[in-house]
Image (cartoon, coloured by chain):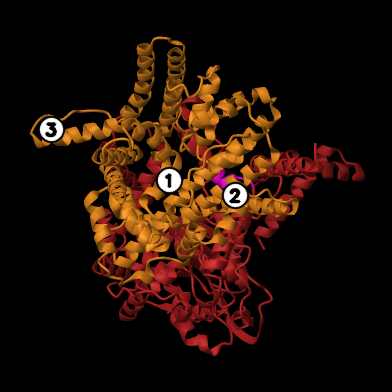
Chain colours: A orange, B red
Amino acid sequence: MVFSSNIFLIFFLPIFLIFYFASPKSWRNVVLLLFSLVFYAYGAPDFIALLVGSCVANFYLVKLMHHSSNQLAKKLYCAAAIIISLGLLIYYKYANFFIENINVLLSACGAHTITFAKVLLPIGISFFTFQSITYVIDTYRGNNYPMKRLHDYVLYIMMFPQLIAGPIVRYCDIEQEIRERKYDISEAMQGFYRFIIGLSKKILISDVIGIQVDAVLSGDIAMLDSGTAWITIIGYTMQLYFDFSGYSDMAIGLGKIMGFHFPENFDNPYNSSSITEFWRRWHITLGSFMRNYLYIPLGGNRCSKSRMYFNLWIVFLLSGFWHGANWNFLIWGAYHGIWLVLERMGLKNFYDKIGKIPSVIITFLIVMIGWVFFRIENFSEAITFISKMFAFDFGTLSSCYDSQFITTLAVALVFSFMCLLPFGKKIQNFVFYTNYSKSQHIVVWLIALFLLFFNLGSLNAVGFSPFIYFRF
Amino acid sequence: MNKDRVFHTILFILTILFFLMILIQTVWHPFEYDKLRGITDDVEFPSLTFDSLYDGSYQRQLDAYLSQNYGFREPSIRFYNQYIWDFYGKENVDHIVSGKEGWLFYKHHVDDYYGQEMYRWQSDKETAIKTYDAEVRRMMQLRNRLKQYGIEFLMFIAPDKAFIYPEYLPEQEYDTTTVNARKYYSRRFDEVGFPYIDMTEMFIQMRDTVPYPLMPIKGAHWNNSCVYGIDSLLHLMGSLKGEQLADFSYGETIPAYRYMDVENDIETYINLFSTGDIDEKYEAKERLYTIVSDSNTVKPNVLFIGNSYLFQVYDYIPVNELFSDMSHWYYNRMSYKGFNRIHHEYSEIDRLQTILMADYIVWFADGAQVYKTSYGFVEDALMRLYVDEKRISDVYAEVRDSIADAMMAKMPNDTIFDTIAFYNQMWEKASTLILKYPERFFEEIRKDSIPEDMQKKIDNILIGKQIVQNEKWHNKIINYAHLINKTIDKVLEEEIDNIYHNRPLLRDKEIVLTADERTELLNILIEEIKSKPDLLESIRQKAIKHGKTLEQAIIDDANWILEDKLRKCNQ
């Protein structure tokens, strides 16, 4: 099920909220879990057993690990739990990729290729795998105690607001709230507003931009002029951000309605003045996971410079691969890794010298070029696209896009960059973090209801599109 | 609980109620809204089964159902459409084009103007010209054949707004590699002498002579300006047969007091609350008129093969004052009969008879529809004139089956499909193929003369037509059929038989019943009376009033009815 779908907005959400708030507090986790199972089963009924099964296995392995006094046994249980989680991820997400590439090599050598039935990808597997790993490792490290009740653990993994596309919530960040959380009705209202902001980002901005971007990219890239190429990639840059951050807003908002505080996933990423900063602002929970569970265990900064550069690059290569089993994601990850290494090698000093705004522009350009590899699967087409961007042939620009696209793109750019100015930051803080007065509440509430109604109209007048990050 | 908490709680409850209201409206629809116009999928609420959930069909159907039926769908979609219309001048409908100064156009008309419509129907210019030439040849063949039977076949091209008011079209590139069907047909008609009227050209001439738009600015079809079209059509029809048909006499122009739906039929498809006010200079006006006729005026029976432009003619003009009868074969697929547009199943009507019973047959279409080559009417009419109906059905079935076999051969063995729907689809394919190349399937059509058996059938219908056109004779047939409890068609058939065999005609006979016939008809009438409780009750009352037995009163009534029918027969 998808947040921006009729079934979720019309049936699932209101029915869930009624059941949830009508239940005694001690039952709310069970209600949330049951609805989360329905949420997942509606979209992927054939994988629900797999997901629950892996949760059960992890839960008991971690329990055994925690109660074991033998260090070797602890390590073995920990390894077993991680292998199960990663094994499922590797099988379901990467088996097709590996076999296809092996077959390419085999056929190049004239050998028989491997015949195999394509493996279907369980939705959200990349996210729930990482969450289960944080639970296993944090418990192993002694950062927290294991869950006492199985259904609480399953709830941690399967809680519907963040099940499918994050944020990746570390177990230690949410443990307390799963056990016992405070209900603040004013926070619930803030959560509702946040949900509507996310929904609007998705439907009114991302989807509108996406129609034109998809239309251009489904055509012949070799025929593009530079203007169209630039507008298209700026469009995609905005589409992706508003799609994913919109989803995160909805997840965080839903969490708040139920009394959870999920970590923020975005912090004006396009205002970054370096790629290093970009990764502190973009998909923050993934960056945090990679740092804590991959970069630091590899040695982090406490090793030789060359080793550190290698660690950094490999982390980003894998981070790219996490996004999808395809060469374009590997290239995208490697591309970002290279820029991070370059920044550590001295590029950062250059940014510091030229000042904030020029370095934001340069970073934005680097990020946009990165999105070309992210969006266009075929490498040679991606290169063609980039060459079109820099061919500086601005022939037929005016006839390419309609006024709704251009206006929406302009609005998206304003929202993306307004926090570079103090006034913009003020507006953002007001919208997201202010405790409204009663009159402000009423105004914001009316706007939120209007936006909900308006989004429904847009969703059904234009047509449904799923979230981009669902396939990762 | 502090005041803030109470406030937030109320707000939160109201929020949930808002969601619930949408849910309730989705399920029970307590509030009624005007339906949105356009194509909607009639999806039923799916029933949940394990299999349907597992294979995803339940989810797909539920999504489709909700998309068509969610609560407050109509106002929310109108609201969104209004937003994109007001802010971006965009519409969410692919067959509508927004022009300048608030003018709206049907996309086919715009494409036709810019030379792109041809590609919707033909692969290239050469094929298009071949198709149109073949069509003109068949039209002339049909026209010549029908003319022998006293029937005029002609064409009326309804006005195409885009050509009449091109200055309001959005700027677009012209495609010069195509051929415009309307212009091509007109040229060919002039060459071969096929009678036609092109109202687009007439309206282009007229547009600057009238102080109002001849076509509605937010509608696709014509409005009251259809009067000019029908006036011209009647003049052409009359000139073809040398008949005096009804005439129009025009008066002053007034603001349209009969504001027709067509004024904004395009606008309604955009599903907005409003497209805004119309500039005064574009407001609908109408020209008052009276229909002029006298005792010499002929009211013909006309068969129109046409599209929706004819609906405004029905709505705006008292067609019963112009014609004795009219039929409208809508896109040659649906049949409307008479002045009240009674719908008849097209497949069930006797097409040959309807064609031959008409005095005039008019292919009636706007320029963008001319590409559709008479909707297959000309080809079908030729087949029905030259070929026996049974053979036509047999050939259709044969072609359908061979297409079906070929299709099934390509399907995997375990393919499950709806047999009826599949064969209906194959029938459509067969029909398209046969109508495209009728001469390949029915050699008879190529010949000059009509086969003997068909000629006899045609003659019978034409004699029937003569009878029907003679009021006295026709009434005698009807009354006699009523008297002896036979169908009118059966009596007509017998009368035609009388003509062929030189027997005395019913027309000239005085009907006298023998004693046996009288007894038999009386018995039938008595049974009929007894089967009607209301009639029986009124006879019972009469019987009581006149002191008769019920049985006697029934016999008396039956006798009276029989005598009355007999009297009418011999009038």
**Are the numbered discs 2 and 3 placed on the same chain, yes or no?**
yes
Residue at x 45%, y 63% (from the top left corner)? B356
Relative to B11, residue B94 above or below: below
Question: Tag 2, which secondary structure?
Answer: helix
Q: Are marks 2 and 3 in contact (CB under 8 Å)?
A: no
Task: Work out whether residue B188 or residue B88 is closer to the camera in this orientation and state it.
Answer: B88
- The region drawn magenta spans B66-71
Where does residue A83 sit, x and y in percent of width and height? Answer: 34, 22
Amino acid residing under circle 1: Arg
Q: Is residue B453 visible?
A: no
Nearest to N terminus: mark 2 or mark 3 = 3
Where does residue B369 sit, x and y in percent of width and height? Answer: 42, 67
Amino acid residing under circle 3: Leu
Residue at x 26%, y 66% (from the top left corner)? B124
- Name the chief secondary structure element in magenta: helix
- Residue at mark 1: A280
